[in-house]
Amino acid sequence: MKPPPRPVSQQLNEAIALFQQGHIADAEAGFRAIMKRDPRHFDALHLAGVAAAMAGRLEEGATLIRRALAINARSAAAHGNLGSTLIRLGRYSEGLISLDRALVIDPKAANAHHNRGFALMKLQRLDDAIAAFDRAIALQPDFAAAHNDRGSALMDQYKLQEALAAYEKALSLNPHAPGNMVNVALILCELQRYAEALAMADTALRLDPQHGSSLIIRSRALLALGRAAEALTTVEKVFQADPKSVQAHLWRAATLNLLAQPEAALVAVEQARALAPQDASVHNNYGFALGNLGRLEEALASYDVALTLKPDDRETLWNRALALLVLGRFEEGWLAYEYRNLRHKTVAARKYPKPLWWGKEPIAGRHLYIYWEQGLGDTIQFARYALLAAAAGAQVSLSVQDPLIRLFKDFAPGVTIIGQNDAPAEFDLHCPLMSLPLAFGTRLETIPAFENGYLKATAEDAARWDQRLPKGGRRIGLVWSGSQIHTNDANRSIRFAKFSALFQPGDVWVSLQKEVREADRAALAGSGVMDMSAELGDFADTAALIANLDLVISVDTSVAHLAGALGKPTWVMLPFSPDFRWLLNREDSPWYPKMRLFRQGRAGDWDGVVARIGEALRQ
């Protein structure tokens, strides 16, 4: 006699036990066995759908959960699981509807609030997402994933310190999770705390030596610390774990660019493009790689493809703007350059109750507040526009970084200089400094160049340096390296030893470096070049020293802009792929009439640049 079948309730409990033990396939088989006996069994349909989704069969899982909800639409858990499955399918708006239904039934479902926040974050409703994460955390304070995703939403808003706190909280709740460590390291990189980021990545790799994201963030930190060869070795390890890692190809390309190997970098991005032809970031990086080879028109076409795939991608919009500007297409370029306000690397998007000035209205008789936003060289270069505003009749307040305060102290009548964190008590209009070319409609032929410069050192400071310098020969100032934390430092800085052949008897060579790298100290000490680094307190000191020189030779750094703004003959050494302000294929600069440009003929060829400078000095 055939034994009677087990009760459905027993089958269900056994399948649930398997599910809870992680035996997902066996549990799903148990749920489906129940469905054969009772095709409308709510729990079996619901949990079979969850199991199918966990096994990666997302569409099938969503269908089964929907069938369950057709039987019982009052299950908060089923609505929540449908919502999370739809989110995994990338159908965020649909997922949000299901999660909202779950929360109507059970407002205290912390997991539904968390998933709802994730969907909102993907829909770029960041404030709403953070509110949803906050609700999940209020209900479940130790919810590590909610703290982590809250950090990601804050990161998208570029609230770095708050994001770091959220990521660190998630890590404290789950201290052995390499993924949480990577997120902390990522924020530390954004805060330019690269040594700490490197240490965090190394900690993650001790837990999981093949953790791809940890290797990638480690390579990023190494790149920023100027250790490009180590970065390349690190990113190569990613391929051992995942030969098809798109991110590894992209970071390999970034590293190769900084090692002056743009052709190899292009190949790396082409490999990423073959793996992910619909990934906007790949086409953005492909455009960047083409740009580094001087193929700017092709780069623009690649950026256009990226923007077709992701119209609001900040990095692509930014790179496209720089390509337009370096091509001299200012009418499009300055407008596109406003996309920098969406990015984190500037402080252009300050918020004030007064209106921004875009050049559309007269400013005569009005108080215009202009503020710095990027590097010291950028402030020096674009401060000339404050003179144009004053000439147009505006009362101008110009905020500059503190190291520039003394240099700009007596800048011009009608221009009041204030500190980097200051704003005038009252003003009518405001404008970030590097939006002024757009406001004034600058084109190549209308760049406001000043034949004799627009900055000056004080006579007293200049006289003090004159007494210090030897008389008789040409006085030549030299700058061979910029800031080590500059993202392109490896391509724009040169080892001091490369200049040794230039130091001929009869000339007086003066180092204008404020910071001398340890690797250059011995060569500098034995060169006969006067090292003034200990006495250069700020840019006013450097300006006074430059006032006593006949020529300044510099890499692309703030001192080059200072010398140009002082009206001093200046020779600038440029990498093969230059910054946008130097344009292409010309030896002069429309920004500085007394400047001459010496460009690399191929990536990394500083020897050729130094040789041409030597010939120019002999002439």
Image (cartoon, rainbow, N blue to C red):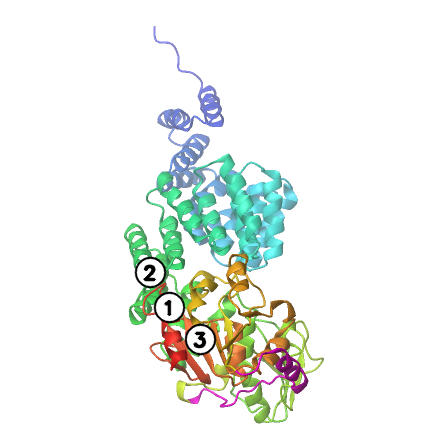
Please, what secondary structure does the residue beneath circle 1 have? Answer: loop
For marks 2 and 1 on the same chain, the one whose residue lies earlier in the sequence = 2
**The disc labelled 3 sits on which kind of residue?**
Val
Q: Kindly identify the residue that appears in the image at 52 percent across and 90 percent down.
A: 452
Quadrant where the N terminus is found in the figure: top left
Please, what secondary structure does the residue beneath circle 3 have? Answer: strand
Please say whether residue 313 is visible from this viewpoint.
no
Near-viewer residue (346 or 120): 346
| Residue 268: % across, % down | 32, 53
- Classify 10 Å Cα crowding around label 3: few (below 14), some (14-19), many (20 and above): many
Q: Kindly identify the residue that appears in the image at 52 percent across and 63 percent down.
A: 526
Please say whether residue 549 is visible from this viewpoint.
yes
Q: Kindly identify the residue that appears in the image at 41 percent across and 67 percent down.
A: 319
Kindly report which numbered mark, 1 or 3, lies closer to the viewer in this rendering. Answer: 3
For marks 1 and 3 on the same chain, the one whose residue lies earlier in the sequence = 3
**Pointer 1: what residue?**
577
State whether residue 180 is above or below residue 423.
above
Q: Give the side of residue 441 with respect to residue 424, left or right.
A: left
Pointer 2 and pointer 1: residues touching (CB < 8 Å)? yes
**Pointer 3: what residue?**
572
Q: Magenta stretch: residue 466 in it?
A: yes
Quadrant where the C terminus is found in the figure: bottom left
Pointer 1 and pointer 3: residues touching (CB < 8 Å)? no
Near-viewer residue (481 or 586): 481
Q: Give the side of residue 193 with respect to residue 444, left or right.
A: right
Near-viewer residue (302 or 352): 302
Give me the disc on residue 245. none
- Classify 10 Å Cα crowding around label 1: few (below 14), some (14-19), many (20 and above): many
State whether residue 266 is above or below residue 549.
above
| Residue 30: % across, % down | 40, 24
**Pointer 2: what residue?**
262
Please, what secondary structure does the residue beneath circle 2 have? Answer: helix
